[in-house]
Each structure stands twice: as C-alpha cells, then as structure tokens.
Amino acid sequence: GNLEMALLSMQDIARQIPEYSIFTAGYLIRDPDHLAKVYGGPIGAEVSRRIAEAMGIQLLQAVYLGTRQVSLNQPRQVRTPADLAGVKLRMPGSKEWLFLGQALGASPTPLAFTEVYLGLKTGTIDGQDNPLPTLKSAKFYEVTRQIVLTGHLVDVLQLAISAKTWNALSAAHKAQVKGAAAKAAKFNDENRAREERELVEFFRSQGIEITTPDVEAFRRTVQAAYLKSEYAEKWPRGLLERINAVK
C-alpha cells in the first residue's frame, strides 16, 4: 500500500503467482511484435484479471524492455550452449534468473547490478546478460570484449497501479490513464527497438566482437530445460501452445 504505481517484471509477478513463471522462460516470446500481441490480446487480458484478483494490482500496459544478449569480458567461440560451460555468467539473484543462466549452459553467478562492472573488470564474473541499451547506459561495454547475440529473452516490464488507486478513479480518468500508458509504450517500444539496432554498430566501433551463435541450438536446449523443470509443472494447461500460436 506504500506505492500507487510501479514497473513490475514478470519475475516479480511469478514469485507471487507461480504458474506465471511461464512468462520468465527463455525463448518463449519471439520478438517485440510477438510480445505486444501476447500481452495486448486475450492472453494478456486473462493475465491482468488473475493478477488483479491475486495481488490487488491492475496492469495498465506491457512495455518492451529489450532483448537480452550475453556479453563476455574475454572473447571465446560460442556456437551452442555447450560452449558456455564453466562461464561465470552474472544473473540477478532470484531462482528464476539463475535457472535461465543454467539453461543457457553457463554457471550462473548471482551478483548485484551495481557490482557487475567491477566484476567484469576483475574477472569475478566472465560475462553478464542484459539488453544492449543497458550494456550502453551502465557502461558495461567498457569492460566487454564480445557480445553473443543469443536473443534468449525478449524482456517486458508491466506498468502497474494499485487496485485501490485504480478503483478510486472515475471511468473517464481510467480511460485517460490507459490511453496515456498505451501512448508511452508505443513511443518506448519503437525507440527501444531502433536503439538496439543502432547499438550493434556502436559496439563494433568500440572494438567489441559481435557474434551470432546457433540460436536454434540455444532455443532447443533452453526450452527443453524449462519443459523438464519444476516450473513447467505449474504452467496453466495449454497456455504454452496458445502463446506459440499468436502470430
């Protein structure tokens, strides 16, 4: 009750609603367009209703955060997940994130975001994963020698408002808030995708090696790891197929 609005990750939500760990799975969402259609369609409406009931939170709009890529402080040949064996890959500290790092084939290493730059510089970690704009804004590229375009997680943030605050608004004000959220998301999503495209060339100009692995090998390995995991046991029946069917 201390906050009226916030940006929530699906990892935050999955800790409260375990079946929604499906939305934290690697290679679930194909690209930003797929993301917008999943969260902006019937599936997203169902998710919003469930979250409102379970958490007392009203989702206003899904916002594209970026597509996560692997970056390394020393170059290496990375074609398949097997090539990341033994790589100390920094991940956020929750079990959902650590599982993703393990599924990618690496040795997931929890480390606070504020410590990542120094960790890459000193070798405490060998790499990290984040969208390219984060690599730029946090200056991680200064201690990065290689970016591997795994594209393993098309990441989303949910602009959310407390149900108490939402329910106190008039119908007209609710419509205005929803409209403003949609407009802001459109601006963000278009600019974030453009920024990601442009940053590939920027990083090359900084002497960073940009490589593309066998993404299908990564996709198969990561998806198989999730399907065999305890997470998949909690996923709503048929939801994976419905998400995959969104075009």
Image (cartoon, rainbow, N blue to C red):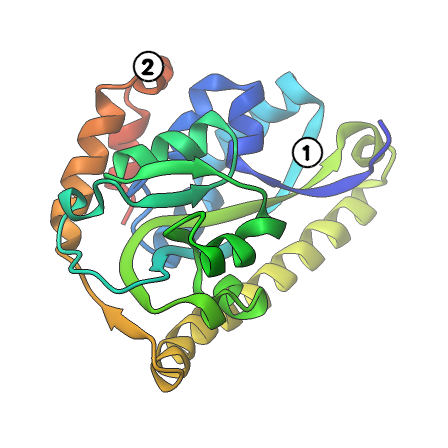
Name the residue at 82% across, 38% down.
4
Residue, disc 1: 58
Q: Which of 90/197 is in front?
A: 90
Mark 2 surroundings: few (<14), some (14-19) or many (≥20) residues within 10 A: few
Q: Which of 86/105 is in front?
A: 86
Name the residue at 50% across, 65% down.
140
Name the residue at 37% across, 61% down.
73
SS under mark 1: strand
Q: Which of 194/95 is in front?
A: 95
Residue 7 to residue 226: above or below: below
Quarter of the image with the N terminus in it: top right
Residue, disc 2: 230
Kind of residue sitting beneath label 2: Glu
Looking at this view, name the residue that lies furthest to the bottom.
205
Does the residue at mark 1 contact the one at mark 2 (Cβ under 8 Å)? no
In the displayed structure, does residue 123 sit left or right of residue 167? left
Q: Position of residue 95 (x, y in %)?
A: 46, 26
> Can residue 63 be seen by looking at this rendering?
no
Residue 18 to residue 104: above or below: above
Q: Position of residue 124 (x, y in %)?
A: 45, 47
Numbered-mark total: 2
